Image (cartoon, helix red, strand yellow):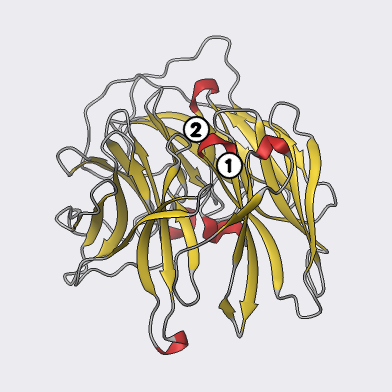
Amino acid sequence: MVPLAAVFTAGFVAIGAHARASTGIGPTRAKVQSFVRRSVGPGRTVQDKFAGVIFGWAVDENGTDGFLTEVVPPSGDPYTSYVETFDQTTGKITKVVKKQNSGPSGAKELAATAIVANDVGLIEDQIDVNYQPNDKWYLMAPVTGGKVTGKWTPPPGAYFHLWDIADQQVDPNAVMATTINEHGISRPPTFQVIVGNFATSQILFTLNTPQGDGVNYPYLVAEDMGTHHAYVPAANYSSNTVFIDYDVVTGHVSNNFVAPAFSGPVSGIAIDSATHMMCTSTHSTYSIQIYNLKTKQQTFVGQVPNAGGEGQAPSSIAADPINHYFIVTQPNSLRGGSEIYVYDENGNEVEELPGFLFGDGAGIQVIPKTRTGWVPGPSFNQLQSFTY
């Protein structure tokens, strides 16, 4: 799933599949093995239609369609937003679905937000009122239909903002990381987890954080589809990283899942629902961490390759529940440009994929059945496919 906060903004090394999990700094590396007749690394690109800046994108992980929004001109007011669909197999724009002018003050902007179950696309109409969000949402159900089919009605709350949606395209009931700002700028926003169905506008749960836990930007959420528990990284009174555990079937919330000391604030998160393993990234230690969700224990922590500090920290993560990999982005590598790393769930580095150029928190989506994925770049008006 592409983090919603990010809408603004070739070679490989293969190793063996099994090795000892490590809790020391530095990834475990095993004997190098090549994959026969399989090319990995950057692939085709999608170029938006009007050479504007892409502000939001998503792909259908169960099909070949995707959609994006671009803004033309790239800077200055007024501007025009476009919603466009594309074909993942050809990289071609297939239709301009919607066009919207910003107005003279630049107060309105369309942003492709996500594709959820049943190929339902969510488009945010970002409307600023006195520097606070007063957004609306449109639906494309399905995206392959190439047209806006309705609206999503968000839950009540002043200045509601949708930050992240747990990455899964199976269950129509989606888990969202959201905030409301009832008191304007005088108090911090209130964080909530919303469980609901976009297609029907049904809200099943509005869940708050336990007292004493603080959820700070980036607001992230990931769901284990095997147990229907969602996890939000936060911090407790002792400044330890805690993963707030939301049972999205019963609505029960707990905070007894605490990471080891000095794990650092979380900047990316993904879950393999088939094995109940979770991977997170941390800027402060430029490392990834792997957790067993059944035992709530950290099983691995290691710094990413080609990093000398926070400037080369990992960022967004995607899970592959078929091949049981975590795919990790590194926006700035010491080797230049951006890189993607593939880890198995013991913390072994399986592949290094150089040759990309994307920003911090830019997002990543993978299609496990074809071992392909998408990231932004290499230009501001392009999306980049890759094979791992």
In the rendered structure, the answer to whether residue 263 lies left or right of residue 355 reads: left
How many labels sit on residues?
2
Q: Position of residue 302 (x, y in %)?
A: 31, 43
- Amino acid type at image mark 2: Glu
Kindly indicate the quadrant of the structure image that contains residue 387: top right
Q: Viewer-proximal residue, 256 or 260?
A: 256
Label drawn at residue 352: 2
Up-down relation of residue 74 to residue 374 (above or below): below
**Residue located 60% across and 28% down the image:** 63
Above or below, 252 against 31 in this view is: below
Image-based side of 215 in relation to 165, left or right: left
Q: Give the crowd class for mark 1: few <14, some 14-19, many >=20 residues within 10 Å.
A: many
Q: Any mark on residue 134, and which?
A: none
* Residue 9 in sight in this render: no
Q: Residues within 10 Å of mark 2 (few under 14, many from 20)?
A: many
Name the one closer to the observer, 129 or 186: 129
**Residue 305 visible:** yes
| Image position, residue 158 (x, y; %) | 47, 77
Would residue 56 be found to the left or right of residue 91 on screen? left
Q: Relative to 46, say whether 232 is above or below.
A: below
In space, the residues marked 2 and 1 are separated at their CA atoms by 33 Å
Which label lies toward us, 2 or 1? Answer: 1
Return the mark for residue 120. 1
Q: Residue at x 70, y 26 (%)?
A: 89
In terms of secondary structure, where does tag 2 sit?
Answer: strand
Q: In which quarter of the view is residue 253 placed?
A: bottom left
Front-lying residue, 14 or 173: 173
Which of the two labelled residues, at mark 2 and mark 1, occupies the earlier sequence position? 1
Amino acid type of the residue that numbered disc 1 sits on in the rendered structure: Val
**Above-or-below relation of 160 to 226:** below
